[in-house]
Amino acid sequence: MLERVGFDVVAVAGDGEELLRKTRMHTPDVAIIDIRMPPTFTDEGLQAAMTIRKDLPETGVLVLSQYLEDQYALELLGDDAAGVGYLLKDRVYDLQRFGDAVRTVAQGGSALDPEVVSQMLGRRRVEDPLAALTPRERQVLTLMAEGRSNQAVAEVLVISERAVEKHVTSIFAKLGLPPTAEHHRRVLAVLTYLRA
């Protein structure tokens, strides 16, 4: 499937250990990983993904799961969602979207399944950090959490890209995310959104 949409597959692995060994050997742009891998089919893939993120930060990680496991998604995202994707396996059959997710992760972006985003939105804190956002800003942030660019957000909401930029700037201000050299504000805004 990956080759049909223009990707080079450099290796295939049957378990977490082989995955780590081949990822270190080939240093691919993206490692696509099933959360549940042999031998126990519990979280070997997730553990391998976490190791790849730590040891090989130049390799993006796209995790596939049969079922929504939001705790795994949160664990994988950690404090930085750059170069990370989490999709439900049934999304793979839409080759265009799957290919887009792989490209996004390869370029250092994040690709989160809409169901993962919705499930995480269902979690509520006593203090909602998003309470100050307007309904339109929430729409923009939701689309950002799906990995969409400002241009894509503008197309979905049928507004100008400049209007999206203004909403994004306002979101950053309301979430208390000043510009810094150490942090990517867009990623931090999405993480705040997912944890809210």
Image (tube, rainbow, N blue to C red):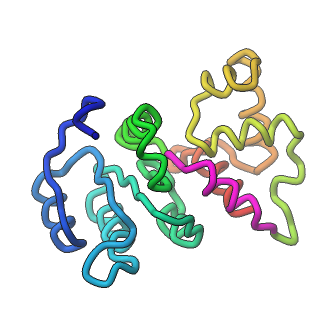
Would residue 190 be found to the left or right of residue 166 on screen? left
In the image, 1 versus 30, the foreground residue is 1
Residue at horizontal 14 percent and vertical 66 percent from the top: 21
Nearest the camera: 108 or 40?
A: 40
Residue found 76% across the figure and 41% down from its top: 171
Give the residue drawn at x 56%, y 40%.
147
The image quadrant where one finds the C terminus is bottom right
Instruction: Spot the residue most to the bottom.
Output: 40
**Horizontal arrangement in the rendering, residue 134 relative to residue 99 (left or right):** right
- Picture coordinates of residue 63, whole percent (x, y): 40, 58
- Left or right? Give the position of 28 relative to 67: left
- Picture coordinates of residue 24 (x, y %)? 15, 60
Rendered position, 64 above or below 40? above
Name which residue lies at 77% across and 31% down.
Answer: 167
Magenta part of the chain: 111-124
Quarter the N terminus occupies: top left
Q: Is residue 14 above or below residue 62?
A: below
Residue 81 x/y as whole percent: 50, 53
160 left or right of 65 in image: right
